[in-house]
Amino acid sequence: MPDFSLSPELESLRDMARKFARTEMVPHAAECDRSARFPEEIYRKAHALGLMNLNVPAEFGGTGLSLLEQCLIVEELAYACGGMTTSIIANCLALEPILLAASPEQKQRYLPSFCSEYHLASFCLTEPGGGSDAGALRTRARREGEEYVLDGEKCFITNAPHASLYTVFATLDPAARHRGIAAFVVPRSAKGLTPGKDEEKMGHRASSTSTVRFDGVRVPVADRLGAEGEGFALAMRTLDQTRTPIGALATGIAQAALDHAARYALKRETFGKPIAEHQAIQIKLANMAQAVHASRLLTWHAAWTIDRGQKGTLESSIAKCFASDAALHVADEAIQTFGGYGYMKEYPVEKLLRDAKLTQIYEGANEIQRTVIARELLRGYA
Ligand code: COS
């Protein structure tokens, strides 16, 4: 029988994340959004509490949480601030290729320092000319003896200006498309590696995003992850793991929007009664509640599937795609419930719409999620 209850351990994990989110993140969310401030002091506290590097196993000093446990935490953090959450969980994305493909010796070399001290890592896949078509990336890797030389540029890289390590995907042979790609681990100190300036973004403004340039960056062969040609599949396997938490992140934003709208609807009066008593508003709230509930269940189901050792390509894309579309819609309806006030920056709901928007785009645009879903689905009919 499926069991939707959370064990006392899961509840206490969720409560710990909720307490951190409400006491440490909420008070600074509006200010960081307004000024696009990267609140490193909050990220350091998250690290100290074990809320970063959630996927790193205990043998390397991490918490080694299941994906379901990670999702419970991510939803709570995102309820407080989507942008801060993106920066807090970016290490999980950047370190996942190491977890999946590094040798035991490489894991020992890269992972423990992230758990013992506060460090950020960035996942470098997307390029100015190749976002959704990840197999068409152009950053070159040329082998020279016991080193590779990397040249090219990545864009939209979360935490890049603050990172000490980068997992980088580059091609040895663009003509071979995805079969020419390899993955590398590159330290910030590598000569020729230059993060760009912070991008000015619509939402997720407490998070930092920039380009990363590679100009003749020399990477020892010992820092290649897996074999030459295996990089593309590694990127895809990484995203299979990390798209589900984006479903949780979107659910957190949507739950916040619903809560704000419901509280406001009980307080605000028109035609002599609270707007919550008008059927038009009740229908909105009911639809929003359904969307939040379905997002959470799809996310939990995807996490449960992957925690059982299955690939979860289909389930994670469904969760990410559904929850992010739902979050945008729920945030929009929350603004509509607030009316003119909802459009004002003085109220919290317009930020939720701006933050929700990115969840439809990053970790694979929802058009790509639908491509993945359709391909996985049609396999069952072939
Ligand atoms: N796990 C393991 N291997 C996978 C895989 C997965 N989930 N998905 C694809 N592969 C493998 C395929 O099996 C195929 O292997 P072979 O060469 O051995 O046949 C190879 O990868 C190429 O797969 P495919 O033909 O599906 O590649 P496409 O070029 O058609 O692209 C999409 C596939 C569109 C799904 C891919 O480019 C993609 O996910 N793009 C979005 C990238 C993204 O999410 N960017 C965000 C970055 S983080 S902000």
Image: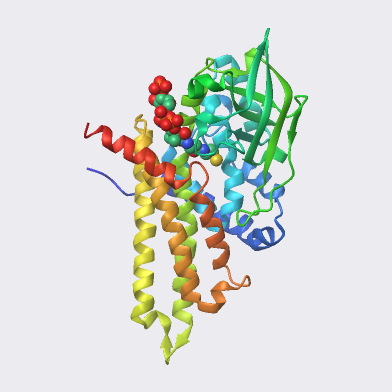
- Residue 105: quadrant of the picture: top right
Which residue is the extreme one toward the front?
Answer: 175
Quadrant location of the N terminus?
top left
357 with respect to 296 (left or right): right
Q: Give the residue displayed 57% in from the left and 19% down from the top.
A: 173
Residue 72 percent location from the top left of the image: 45, 47
Quadrant location of the C terminus?
top left
147 with respect to 286 (left or right): right
Residue 16 percent location from the top left of the image: 53, 50
Q: Quick one: 363 or 97, which is closer to the camera?
A: 363
Q: Is residue 104 placed above or below 292 in the rendered structure?
A: above
- Residue 343: quadrant of the picture: bottom right
User: Regarding ligand 1, which quadrant of the image does it lie in?
Assistant: top left
Q: Quick one: 321 or 188, which is closer to the camera?
A: 321
Residue 75 percent location from the top left of the image: 48, 51
- The answer to whether residue 6 is visible is no
- The answer to whether residue 369 is visible is yes
Q: Is residue 220 placed above or below 277 in the rendered structure?
A: above
Which residue is the extreme one toward the bottom?
Answer: 272
Q: Is residue 319 placed above or below 258 in the rendered structure?
A: above
Q: Quick one: 91 or 144, which is closer to the camera?
A: 144
Q: Give the residue displayed 42% in from the left and 92% down from the top.
A: 272
